[in-house]
Structure formats: C-alpha cells, structure tokens
Image (spheres, rainbow, N blue to C red):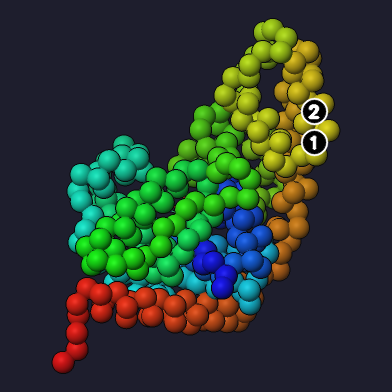
Amino acid sequence: MKETVVSGIRPTGQLHLGNYFGAVTNFVKMQYDYNCFFFIADLHSLTTHPTPQDLHGYVRHVLVEYLACGINPDESTIYIQSDVPEVAELYLYLNMNAYMGELERSTSFKDKVRAQPDNINAGLLTYPTLMAADILIHKAVKVPVGKDQEQHLEFTRTFGNRFNRLYNNDYFPEAFAFNYSDNLVKVPGLDGKGKMSKSNGEGSCIYLADSPEVIRKKLSRAVTDGGPLTENQVKPEPIQNLFDLMKIVSPADTLAHFEELYNKMAIRYGDFKKQLAEDMIVFNGPIRERIEGLSGDSDYLRKVAEQGAEKARESARKTIREVRALIGFKSF
Ligand code: TYM
C-alpha cells in the first residue's frame, strides 16, 4: 500500500517561487509514488478576513497554478478544504485536547500577533489544530512543506498522539515534514531579509505568473549593498539571498561565474541581477503559459474541484466515522 501524503497552500493570491520550491515541486514528484491529497486551505485563509470576492479569486488562482505546475488530478486528489466539512469536525475534536499555553507559544501565532494586533482571533490561535485536522483526516505520514511549517508538524504529532493516548489506541500515525533534498527549503525574498513571503511586501516575491517585465523590474529593485570589501568575504544576507535564488533557477556555471566575480571583488550587481531576472523568466515561462491556458477554462476547473471533493470526502468520511466511534458517539 502506498503511503499517504497531504499538503496544502493558503489561497492569498498567486503562488510565488517560495511556494513552488518549498512545496509544489515536491507535490508534482510525489504524486506517482504516494497516495496524495493536495488541497487549497481556504478555511485557514479566513483568519485574515478576505472579502467574498477575493476569496473565490484566490482559490481559483491556486487551483489553476497547481495544475499549471504539473499536479495531475487523475494521480492526486486536488480539493478545496471547505468542500470537506469533515475537516472542520475533526478540528473541533482536536481543539478539545489542545491547550492555550502550547498554542500561544506557536511561532506563527506570535508572528501574527505582531503583524495584525487588531485581529488576534481564535482561528489564529487554533491554526495548528486545523492544520493537524487537515493531515490527520487522511492519516497522512508525509507532508511536503517548506521550512517555515516544521513547527506545525510537531503540533500535528502532539495532537495525534494525545488523541491516541486519550482513547487508548494507536489510531493516528505520526506525520513528518518532507522534501526530496536533505533539508526543508527556505526560499529567500528580494527585500534583503528573510524568506520570500507576501507579508514581507509584494516586492519580496516573484510570482509564477509574473510577466518578464515585472520580473525585470522587481530584480532591478532587489536589495544589494555597496559591494564586497575584501576578497572571498562572507556575503551579507541580502547578497547571499540573491545567490541562493540564483542557485535555484540558474545553471550551475552561471552561479559559479558570479561567485568567482564576487570573490574577486569584480562583481557588478546590475549585471548579476539582470542575469538572475533572465533565468527566472526562463524558469517561469512554461508555467506562465499553462496558467494563461487554464485560467479561462471554468468547465475543466469545476470538474477537477468536484472530482477532488468527492475523493477527499470519501477518505475523510471514513476517518470521521472511526473517530466518532473511538470517542464514544453511538447511535440509538
Ligand atoms: P503557506 O500557504 O504559507 O505556504 C504554502 C507552502 O509554501 C511553503 N513556502 C515556502 N517554502 C520555502 N520558502 C519560502 N519562502 C516559502 N514560502 C512558503 C510553505 O512552507 C508551505 O509548504 N499552514 C500552511 C498551509 C496548510 C498546510 C496544511 C500545509 C494548511 N494546512 C496541512 C500542509 C499540511 C501555510 O500557511 O502555508
């Protein structure tokens, strides 16, 4: 029997290179070897209160981009989280055994408290239990995610094991973060600090759907410094970030060429950023074309979403039936 894999992305607009290299590229590779469920985490996105109009558009973007990146809906189950209400039911059960103290210590909760002090809602606090429900509902053991999600996987194991102890069984397996390389990935942004993320500003992100002009413009504004001060020096974060991006999208000899120029203090950041922009354009090209081709095909998108919802619900219903029995709900 194939091992089960679950992963999802919050719909907040278009997918960027961080989403792609942290998660989606693994989805595409895993789909042939595992029993895969890839979903669009629209319930999670409600923590930031999108308008009804935006919400649907964002979900559609992710669906189109999943397909454009090569997730095959006949190999993997692609679904929208809110189409599977069993997830919300499991979330409720898990919340009964999730404690304030541990939820308040979550790094992503603390980040959100800083970022949106006027909207610290209970959904933010219990974000890790909803994520655990997403994973446990299909009894997954592997979860392809970027490095930023590692702590959420720890929570998932804690809540699954706690349920098992409480009801004296070994019903839920332990799930671990997964990436084909040795380490989980963190794709840096263009703003000189931290990961590529919408919350670090639009300028930090290269979206899969960005046009060549937009990519060139974003790269020309990417943060650099006054240049290396000594030969072979350690690169400061903004420069290292751009080299890390080049490592991802450019051929190895291009990277080696610019490394050498940097080490000899002969690098011109203008040329370096132009080359990086061109390599990103080449990388994005085929995906962007497929996005354009798919985005108007409402009939196909509806078919994929319906087929996914049906398959995901079948698996989720079975889990909920078994979980209800373990908890002690009985019909008369
Ligand atoms: P989200 O929507 O923030 O990001 C989706 C996926 O993209 C990865 N990612 C990155 N990886 C590397 N470098 C980056 N700069 C970068 N930015 C984003 C994330 O690690 C993630 O894998 N909580 C999740 C969504 C979720 C989920 C789940 C994931 C909800 N339920 C169940 C797996 C299983 C999130 O907010 O990801």
Quarter of the image for residue 53 reads: bottom left
* Vertical comparison of 173 with 218: above or below: below
Residue at 54% x, 52% y is 178
Helix, strand or loop at label 1? It is helix
Residue at 51% x, 33% y is 194
Reading the image, the residue beneath label 2 is: 256
**Residue type beneath disc 2:** Ala
Reading the image, the residue beneath label 1 is: 252
Work out whether residue 326 can be spotted.
Answer: yes
**Residue type beneath disc 1:** Ala
Callouts 2 and 1 close, C-beta under 8 Å: yes
Residue 311 in the image, given as x and y percentages of width and height: 50, 80
Residue at 25% x, 61% y is 165
Residue at 33% x, 60% y is 160
Residue 331 in the image, given as x and y percentages of width and height: 19, 89
Q: Residue furthest bottom?
A: 332
Q: Quadrant of the N terminus?
A: bottom right
In the foreground, 189 or 170: 170
